[in-house]
Image: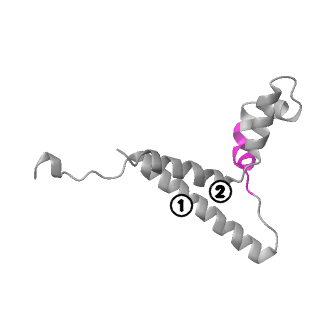
């Protein structure tokens, strides 16, 4: 087998992207199951997922009552309200697309 015939597998970035997409689909399935069972949508946001990190870094006070960096605060609040499944799906898609040409 010559050097040009060696098959190259997917990059680690592509694998991680596929895993993120799979997790996002799993989250949607979980949310749909809970909705079918209880009739209430389980809202899983980035804020819910990042809460332990935010409280560990002492950002919770700034997120509640900002005294400066108001634009960054608006961006952070918007990002924290994003659905986790959508965020994982978009990031995973970009990771798979970005590693496609390698």
The residue to which callout 2 is attached is 85
Q: Residues within 10 Å of mark 1 (few under 14, many from 20)?
A: some
Count of number-bearing discs: 2
Residue 4 on image: x %, y %: 16, 48
Q: Residues within 10 Å of mark 2 (few under 14, many from 20)?
A: many
Q: Is residue 59 above or below residue 33?
A: above
Q: Is residue 41 left or right of residue 21?
A: right
The residue to which callout 1 is attached is 22
Q: Residue at x 37, y 47 (%)?
A: 11
Residue 71 on image: x %, y %: 79, 29
Residue 73 on image: x %, y %: 80, 32
Q: Residue at x 57, y 48 (%)?
A: 91
Please tell me the numbered disc located at residue 62: none
> Was residue 49 drawn as part of the magenta stretch in this picture?
yes
The Cα–Cα distance between marks 2 and 1, rounded to whole angstroms, is 10 Å
Q: Main secondary structure of the magenta part?
A: helix
Q: Earlier in the sequence, mark 2 or mark 1?
A: 1
Residue 33 on image: x %, y %: 70, 73
The quadrant where residue 80 appears: top right
Q: Is residue 81 left or right of residue 94?
A: right
> Was residue 70 drawn as part of the magenta stretch in this picture?
no
Q: Residue at x 89, y 31 (%)?
A: 65
- Residues in magenta, as a range: 44-53
Name the residue furthest bottom.
37
């Amino acid at each position: 087998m010559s050097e040009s015939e060696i098959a190259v597998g997917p990059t680690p970035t592509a694998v991680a992207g596929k895993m993120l997409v799979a997790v996002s689909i799993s989250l949607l399935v979980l949310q749909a199951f809970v909705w079918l069972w209880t009739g209430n949508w389980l809202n899983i946001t980035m804020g819910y997922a990042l809460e332990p990190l935010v409280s560990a870094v002492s950002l919770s006070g700034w997120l509640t009552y900002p005294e400066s960096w108001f634009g960054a605060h608006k961006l952070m609040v918007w990002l924290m309200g994003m659905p986790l499944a959508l965020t994982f799906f978009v990031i995973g898609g970009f990771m798979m697309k970005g590693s496609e040409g390698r």
